[in-house]
Each structure stands twice: as C-alpha cells, then as structure tokens.
Amino acid sequence: MNYSIHNPSGANKVNIYKTYSNKSTCPKSCPLAGNGCYADNFHVNRHWSKVSSGERGTDWQGLLDNVKALPAGALWRHNIAGDLRGKGEYIDNKSLKQLTQASKYRKKQGFTYTHYKPNAENVQALRAANNGGFTVNLSSNNVAQAIEYKKLGLPVVTVLPVDAPNVQTVDGVKIVACPSEKSDRVKCGNCANSFCADSKRNFIVGFRAHGTKKKQADIIARG
C-alpha cells in the first residue's frame, strides 16, 4: 500500500507539505466516494491513481520517515486524497499513534480529515491524536450531522451547499466556509488562522461542493 509526500515547489509556493494515501484507505461508507469527492478531479485523481497502483510513492514506514524528517515547525497536510489507515469501519489506532509521533517530532503542525464513522473506538483514537498535537478533523456530510459531531469534542468539517454563506450560525453553532474558496491568495499554507490545523477551534469549517462532481456533492450537503 503506497503513500506519497510532496514538498512545496514553484515560484508562488506556500509553505505546506502534502501527502496522498492509497485509494483503499477510504472507508466504504463515505457517501462521497465516486459520488462528488473532489479527489476525483482530473489532476488530483491522476496522481492519486498512480500512488494507489504503486507506480509512485513509498510504503508506510517510508511515509513516517518522511514526515519525521520535515523541518521543525513545518505545516503539513496529510491526505490531499485518501484517508487514515484502517480496516472496515475502524481506524488503525496503532498507525495513527505512529503518525502522531512522527508529526510531533520537532513540533511539526500536521492536520488531516477523516470520513470514518465516529464509533466509540474511532473517537478514542481521534481524541488521542488531537490531544497529541496531530489535528484530525472529523468529516461530516451536511450541517446537521456536523453539529451532532461537534458534541463529541472533536474538530469538525462539513460539506456545504454551493450557495452557502461565508459565515452562518445554526442551532447556536458557528460554521465558517473555507476562506480559500473566495480568494486566490488564500491557501492552506498561508491561511491566517490555520483553521483546519487548529484542534481547539470553537467553530465548524465548511467546504462548498466543488469539482467536476459538485452537483452530486451538493445534493449530499443539502441532506
């Protein structure tokens, strides 16, 4: 099972490192799989497919070594595409602990998202990762589900309809749309508040349905 990690590059680079995980890491219960997932967009999917086939990337230990070797304090995003290691509907707690430790070395700022269901075992694993300094956002499919997930005390993100406002409050919970969606100058690497990397934030981060299959994602976001 292959994984890949990419360094910032190009004249207009932002200081963030990114990884991809094999397609088989995505839990089968995710309603976006093949049905609105942004990772199915051509350029992302092209690289993701080559990582998944073994044409590119490294093994799990290689990924851990690469993460550990990132510069001190580096901001990095795990899984532009793919999810945490796991089996069925359960996160591999041992692997998540290893990744958390690799990110913790030299105080790197790592974050990711997971579409695994928040069963008791998964919530325990996610709390340990977030408390250990590696932010794992629990991904939800719509605002109502996101509000329920937030009660678990974990950082939460959600899919939003294409016409969702930048900021909204629902049932007393604040939902802020990703600022990069409205500005070409804002990216993960220069997000002023590093929303998704902050495990202690008191609001939900939303991502409007986007990509070549945004119509399907928009249907899911509307619940």
Image (spheres, grey):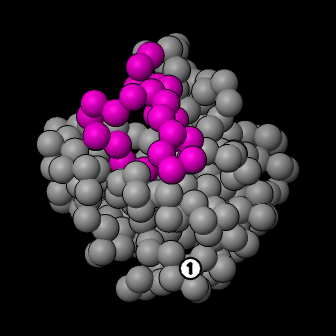
Q: Image point 36% across, 68% down: which residue?
A: 26
Q: What residue do we see at 25% from left, 50% from top?
A: 222
Q: Residue 8: x, y in percent?
A: 56, 31
Q: Nearer the viewer, residue 197 or 140?
A: 140
Q: Does the magenta stretch include residue 83?
A: no
- Element type where label 1 sits in the image: helix
Q: In this view, does 167 lie above or below 72?
A: above
Q: In this view, does 179 lie to the left or right of 218?
A: right
Residue farthest front in this picture = 171
Examine the rendering and report whether any part of residue 42 can be seen. no
Left/right placement of residue 97 relative to residue 63 reads right
Closer to the camera, 203 or 58? 203
Answer above or below: position of 12 versus 190: above
Examine the structure image and report whether residue 174 is included in the region drawn in magenta: yes
Q: What residue type is labelled 1?
A: Asn
Stretch of the chain drawn in magenta: 158-183
- For residue 151, above or below residue 19: below
Q: Position of residue 93 (x, y in %)?
A: 62, 81
The image quadrant of residue 117 is bottom left
Circle 1 packing at 10 Å, graded few (<14), some (14-19), many (20+), is some
Give the percent coordinates (x, y) of residue 205.
52, 43
Quarter of the image where the C terminus is located: bottom left
Q: How many numbered circles are shown? A: 1
Give the left or right position of residue 203, taking residue 117 as reference.
right
Q: Nearer the viewer, residue 56 or 94?
A: 94
In the picture, the quarter occupied by the N terminus is bottom left
- Picture residue at 36% right of the left edge, 48% below the top: 159
Q: Mark 1 points at which residue?
A: 122
Res 163 quadrant in image: top left
Residue 52 image offset from top left, x and y in percent: 32, 63
- Whether residue 146 is visible: yes
